[in-house]
Image (cartoon, rainbow, N blue to C red):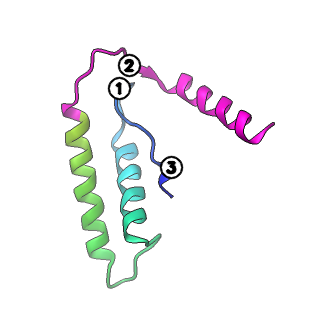
Amino acid sequence: MCRNIRALFNFEPPATAAEIHAAALQYVRKISGFTRPSAANTREFDRAVAAVERASSRLLGSLVTAASARSREVEAARAHTRALRRFGP
């Protein structure tokens, strides 16, 4: 599950709220072991996702770097090249 979490810092354009939410959801799914929580656990699961989302947004907003912003297209092409090397055409 967690291999779907991608780095979100230092991209142009910056990470969207949807991307941060998706990463928070994947993280909570991984540590809880639930893909979908039961009705009894839904409230706490959603609360945890919201907390991770807030912490992630705060972190991404406070980080600084001297490096130039990365391009999503270039990073996607690199990932595709790695996948071709690893799994073949």
What's the residue type where badge 3 is placed? Asn
- 16 lies above or below 27: above
Quarter of the picture holding the C terminus: top right
Q: Secondary structure at mark 1?
A: loop
Instruction: Tell me the residue that label 2 is attached to.
Output: 69
Which residue is painted at 73% across and 35% down in the image?
84
- Marks 2 and 1 in Cβ contact (< 8 Å): yes
Instruction: Tell me the residue that label 1 is attached to.
Output: 10
In magenta stretch: residue 36:
no
What's the residue type where badge 1 is placed? Asn
Magenta range = 61-89
Where is residue 68? Give x, y as percent: 36, 14
Q: Earlier in the sequence, mark 3 or mark 2?
A: 3
Instruction: Tell me the residue that label 3 is attached to.
Output: 4
**Residue furthest toward the right?**
89
- 42 lies above or below 27: below
